[in-house]
Amino acid sequence: MAINLANKVEIMKKFKRHEADTASPEVQIALMTEKINLLTEHFKINVKDHHSRIGLMRLVGRRRKLLIYLHRVQPTKYKSLIDDLGLRK
């Protein structure tokens, strides 16, 4: 269920602000979205895994807070990020 290192590095390269960036809101939101997608696929197979479902709900809440922050601080980056990630259909 974890993101492999190659996929994580690729996501960081795509959404980073500068060369040494690993913790900007864009990178964090993109990594959380990838984890959420992996967990969603996991729940299609393991329906009764309620403990992981609680972790998923926490992850979704944390991503929502970061999205609200990004929308408040940098609305243009927010728009481009949700378009790139396919959120808010």
Image: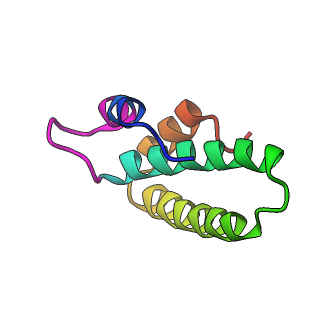
- Taking the spot 54% from the left edge, 42% from the top edge, the residue there is 34
In depth, the one of 8 and 64 nearer the eye is 8
Q: Residue 82 appears in which quarter of the rendering? A: top right
Q: In this view, does 58 lie above or below 60?
A: below
In depth, the one of 9 and 80 nearer the eye is 9
| Residue 8 at x, y percent in the picture | 38, 37
Q: In this view, does 13 lie above or below 59?
A: above
Q: Give the range drawn in magenta.
A: 11-23
| Residue 87 at x, y percent in the picture | 65, 42
- Taking the spot 46% from the left edge, 62% from the top edge, the residue there is 72
| Residue 66 at x, y percent in the picture | 47, 62
Q: How many labels does the image show?
A: 0
Q: Quadrant of the C terminus?
A: top right
Q: In this view, does 26 lie above or below 9?
A: below
Let me know if residue 36 is in the magenta part: no
Let me know if residue 17 is in the magenta part: yes
Q: In this view, does 42 lie to the left or right of 4?
A: right
Q: Residue 58 appears in which quarter of the rendering? A: bottom right
| Residue 30 at x, y percent in the picture | 47, 43
Q: Is residue 45 left or right of residue 59?
A: right
In depth, the one of 31 and 81 nearer the eye is 31
Please tell me whether the stretch drawn in magenta is mainly helix, strand or loop: loop
- Taking the spot 47% from the left edge, 41% from the top edge, the residue there is 3
Q: In this view, does 49 lie to the left or right of 81?
A: right
- Taking the spot 25% from the left edge, 39% from the top edge, the residue there is 17
Q: In this view, does 68 lie above or below 82?
A: below
